């Protein structure tokens, strides 16, 4: 019996694996496969900083969905209302921070300093200016008046004092353990003056060898 070999070209058959969700859209969406979850966690851990964005409602959002430390999916954890006093006298800005939480690592705290003050409401440059004015001899009340004239903002004296103390306290601890460059040979000069109509004097002392000048005391 003769057999005929068919030489026609058949169209390729495409097989698509479908699910019930395609025919019944009311069913809950299928869960992401475990492999895809692990890949997304690995991609999250490979990053080194969280991505922040400001939404139309003045809300700062964390874009990432997984924790950088352990790869666990992050959960939304409410909002923090904040007020920022912008630099260069640009005024007051109100916004919200959308917090996220990791069940293993706790609260996610990215660096918001590019978008908002890290601590308090005032831009960091105000704190630097206040410390510089204080180092140049201005009192907190004078610094307060200078900010009012230059930027139109009314900063409390207690805030200015706190800004100065933030850097003064660790500096004092360092100076306690710093040896005084003294040779034991001192020279001094007595200066008389009037302060508030009252006669006073100060003794300026200097080490004749090291040129170290201690703090002068007015009596």
Image: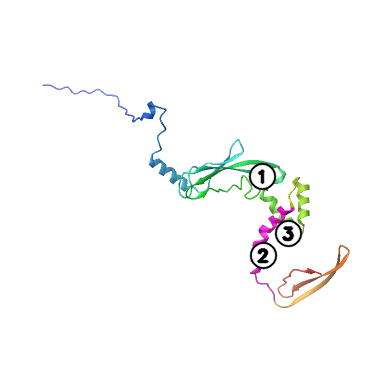
Which numbered circle lies on residue 84? 1
C-alpha gap between disc 1 and disc 2: 30 Å
Question: Which is more N-terminal, label 1 or label 3?
Answer: 1
The residue nearer to you, when weighing 212 against 11, is 212
Q: Earlier in the sequence, mark 1 or mark 2?
A: 1
- In the displayed structure, 26 sits above or below 39; it is above
Dots 3 and 1: beta carbons under 8 Å?
no
Q: Residue at x 81, y 73 (%)?
A: 189
x and y percentages locating residue 177 in the rendered image: 63, 69
Q: Would you identify the image quadrant in which residue 212 lies?
A: bottom right
Q: Is residue 62 left or right of residue 13?
A: right
Residue at image mark 2:
172
The chief SS type of the magenta part is: helix
Measured from the top left, where is residue 71 in percent x and y? 45, 47
Up the image or down, 30 lies above or below 217; here it is above
Front label number (2 vs 3): 2
Local SS, label 3: helix
131 or 207, nearer to the observer = 131
Relative to residue 214, is residue 150 depicted above or below?
above
Magenta range: 157-182
Residue that protrudes farthest toward the right in the picture: 197
Q: Residue at x 49, y 50 (%)?
A: 105
Which residue is disc 3 drawn over?
Answer: 135
């Amino acid at each position: 019996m003769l057999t005929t070999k068919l030489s026609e070209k058949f169209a390729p058959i495409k097989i698509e694996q479908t699910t019930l969700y395609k025919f019944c859209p009311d069913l809950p969406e299928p869960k992401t496969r475990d492999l895809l979850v692990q890949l997304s966690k690995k991609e999250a851990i490979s990053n080194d900083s969280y991505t922040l964005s400001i939404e139309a409602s003045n809300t700062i959002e964390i874009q990432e969905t997984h924790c950088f430390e352990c790869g666990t999916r992050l959960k939304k954890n409410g909002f923090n209302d904040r007020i920022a006093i912008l630099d260069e006298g640009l005024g007051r800005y109100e916004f919200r921070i959308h917090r996220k939480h990791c069940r293993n690592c706790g609260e996610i705290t990215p660096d918001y300093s590019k978008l908002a003050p890290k601590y308090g409401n005032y831009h960091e440059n105000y704190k630097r200016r206040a410390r510089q004015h204080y180092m140049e001899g201005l009192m907190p009340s004078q610094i307060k008046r200078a900010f009012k004239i230059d930027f139109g903002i009314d900063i409390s004296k207690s805030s200015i004092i706190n800004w100065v103390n933030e850097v003064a306290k660790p500096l004092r601890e360092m100076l306690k353990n710093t040896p005084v460059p003294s040779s034991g040979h001192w020279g001094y000069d007595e200066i008389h003056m009037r302060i508030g109509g009252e006669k006073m004097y100060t003794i300026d002392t200097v080490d004749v060898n090291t040129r170290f000048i201690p703090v002068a005391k007015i009596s």
